[in-house]
Image (spheres, helix red, strand yellow):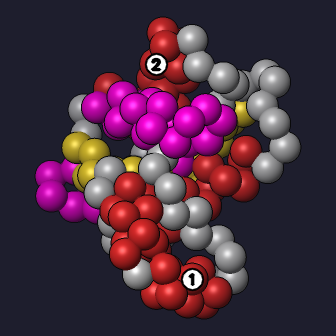
Amino acid sequence: MADLTLDTARKILDAAFAKAGELKLKPLVVTVLDARGVLKIAAAQDGTSLMRAEIAHGKAYGALAMGMGSRALYQRAQEQAYFIDAANTMAQGRLVPVPGGVLIMGDGVLLGAVGVSGDTSDNDEICALAGIEAAGLKANAG
């Protein structure tokens, strides 16, 4: 598998929402980007708060832009705040360095990233991981 298809992105999104329902989480936004950073699919559950779509996109975008899951970006921000701040400045504020942005891998190849926002960052990440795994792919949360 060299490309992330729309059908696969839908599976990721649906499974992430299913996991959120199972865990009874707050309403989420799920965004799936391909390896080029192009939006494949995004959806918001009823009742999400403002800016959740932008945050979900920023988690996925940051993972792709920096080549690591957003949990690793969060760790790096703790250790090297100036570096992450500088990188976010260069990215025009589009990085959201907290858990919930997960790289999507298939056969050792980067296919894209999923970003989830709406509940705690840890719960967002759980849903992203569930979506990727349900699609039969490997996840790299950092």
The 10 Å Cα crowd at callout 2, few under 14, some 14 to 19, many 20 or more, is some
Reading the image, the residue beneath label 1 is 85
Residue 58: where, in percent of width, then height?
Answer: 61, 61
Amino acid type assigned to the residue bearing label 1 in the image: Asp
Residue drawn at point x = 43 percent, y = 46 percent? 5
Q: Is residue 31 left or right of residue 73?
A: right
Residue 93: where, in percent of width, then height?
Answer: 68, 76
The numbered dot on residue 10 is none
- Which badge, 2 or 1, comes first in the chain's sequence? 2
Task: Please identify the quarter of the rendering in which residue 76 is found.
Answer: bottom left
Amino acid type assigned to the residue bearing label 2 in the image: Lys
Q: Answer above or below: position of 116 versus 109.
A: above
Reading the image, the residue beneath label 2 is 19
Specify start and end residues of the magenta stretch as a single range: 106-133
Residue 42: where, in percent of width, then height?
Answer: 64, 42
Residue drawn at point x = 61 percent, y = 32 percent? 119
Q: Answer above or below: position of 54 versus 77.
A: above
Residue 106: where, in percent of width, then height?
Answer: 22, 50
* Mark 2, secondary structure of its residue: helix
The 10 Å Cα crowd at callout 1, few under 14, some 14 to 19, many 20 or more, is some
Residue 109 visible: yes
Task: Please identify the quarter of the rendering in which residue 136 is found.
Answer: top left
Residue 113 visible: no
Residue drawn at point x = 23 percent, y = 43 percent? 138
- Outermost residue on the left side: it is 107
Residue drawn at point x = 59 percent, y = 19 percent? 25
